[in-house]
Image (tube, helix red, strand yellow):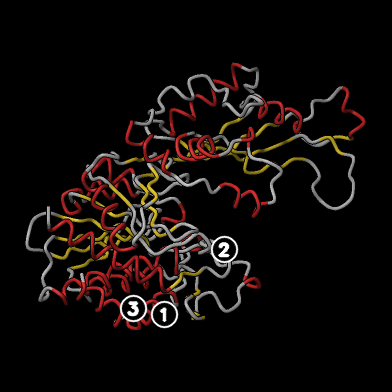
Amino acid sequence: MTDISRYVDTHLEEAISQLRDYVALPTVSAQRQAIAETAQFVRKLLESVGATAEVLPKEEPGNPVVVGELPGDSSRTLLLYNHYDVQPPEPFELWTAPPFELRRDGDFLYGRGISDNKGHLVSRLLAIRAFQEAHGGRLPVTIKFLVEGDEEIGSPKLEEFVQQHRQRLAADVCLHEGGGVNATGRPVVSLGVKGILAVQLRVRTAVRDSHSSLGVTVPNAAWRLVWALASLKDPDERIRIPGFYDAARPPTEQEEAFLRELPHEEEKLKENLQLRDFVCGVRGYDYNRRFVFEPTCTINGLSSGYEGPGMKTVLPSEATAKLDFRLVPDQEPADIADKVRRHLAQEGFDDIEVFAAEGEYPARSAADHPFVELVRRTAREVYGQEPVTYPNGAGTQPLHPMMSLLGVPMASAGIGYPDGRAHAPDENIRLSDFVLGTKHVAAIIEGLAEG
């Protein structure tokens, strides 16, 4: 790894130059901005390391996907998953500099998409170039690329795309889009994600709003919805929907072992959010267990009646609520949506309309898979610290299509850190993390060559 590390250290400016051009492309998938242009840019990035690359269409409403392949000396194959789209940059006034102009300030690089997810792809390409330079242009394993353009809007039609190109994307193992270090600089290895189901509830109790003096006789849509929402959870935060937890996969012994090793960092979050306390007063192991293994039911927003300044004595005729359910392995979005509908009907709320989005399946790699140990071992060697291993993260990414259709284990390795401000103004990475994350990916490639 000495020659590889030296190459990474001495070619950092070239990577920053690539990042400057990449970040300058305002690839906001929610607004379908610069999509075709950025897909072609990514194709050229992959070709710069010798890969054959192609921009392929995805079914509507999906954006194009860039796929590539870089042959190695063996058929053993590593798939790299990334995405080229970014979140909208608003509010602009909270950025220190224009969001699509890369800004360097000491150890920091700022720009929309620098952390999520453009910096990760450039880092991985630098790792490949470093390995090639140290080994006469050769790679010990074949490397494939899947870089999509609408991860930030839920990866529509990604599963259909992976199914259609299953043979072309076939691999033995996969690094998913993210990764990095925790607040104390320890490398974080994540083995999966929670799924998600987004739901909107709506109720109408009359054809129009009324004077609030009629509140003793005319049904109030806001109260109707509040009572329906209250039926979803107990005061102890357990979800009351019958059968909700039935399919949830219990953790294995190895996953429990990783859980016990997780640091207790919740007090920092409590301070940052200025919380009085956490849900049910959880701390330590119980906090981490909920964070990793528990599904959720979250009210994202409520709307009804008059919401402007001052008072308006109105009796609302319509009310809506938006919720999301974070799901753990073996829970299925469509099944949970059906359970929500049945529960509301059984509780006497059959007048509540339920609109469910398609959702994203959860995914989790086997904690005892050899690839997991390889990623952990190489992290330990590169960072000089014991990795923090999450059986799955609390968020959601589109890992299920790769894991289920391609049958690959997935793990994380990357350049992020907790204050990278992904999705927020002044999104950033630290160059020191970029260097270590790059060296970690190179070490994983080397480790795959060793079997």
User: Disc 2 designates what residue?
Assistant: 424
Q: Amino acid at mark 3?
A: Ala
Q: Amino acid at mark 2?
A: Ala
User: Disc 1 designates what residue?
Assistant: 20
Marks 2/1 in contact by CB < 8 Å: the verdict is no
The part of the image, by quadrant, that contains residue 438 is bottom left
Mark 2 nearby-residue class (10 Å; few <14, some 14–19, many ≥20): some
Mark 1 nearby-residue class (10 Å; few <14, some 14–19, many ≥20): many
The part of the image, by quadrant, that contains residue 205 is top right
Tell me which residue sits at (62%, 43%) in the image.
300
> In this image, 413 relative to 100: left or right?
left
Tell me which residue sits at (68%, 27%) in the image.
230
Q: CA distance from mark 2 to mark 3?
A: 23 Å
> In this image, 137 relative to 399: left or right?
left
Is 276 in front, or is 67? Answer: 276
373 vs 337: above or below: below
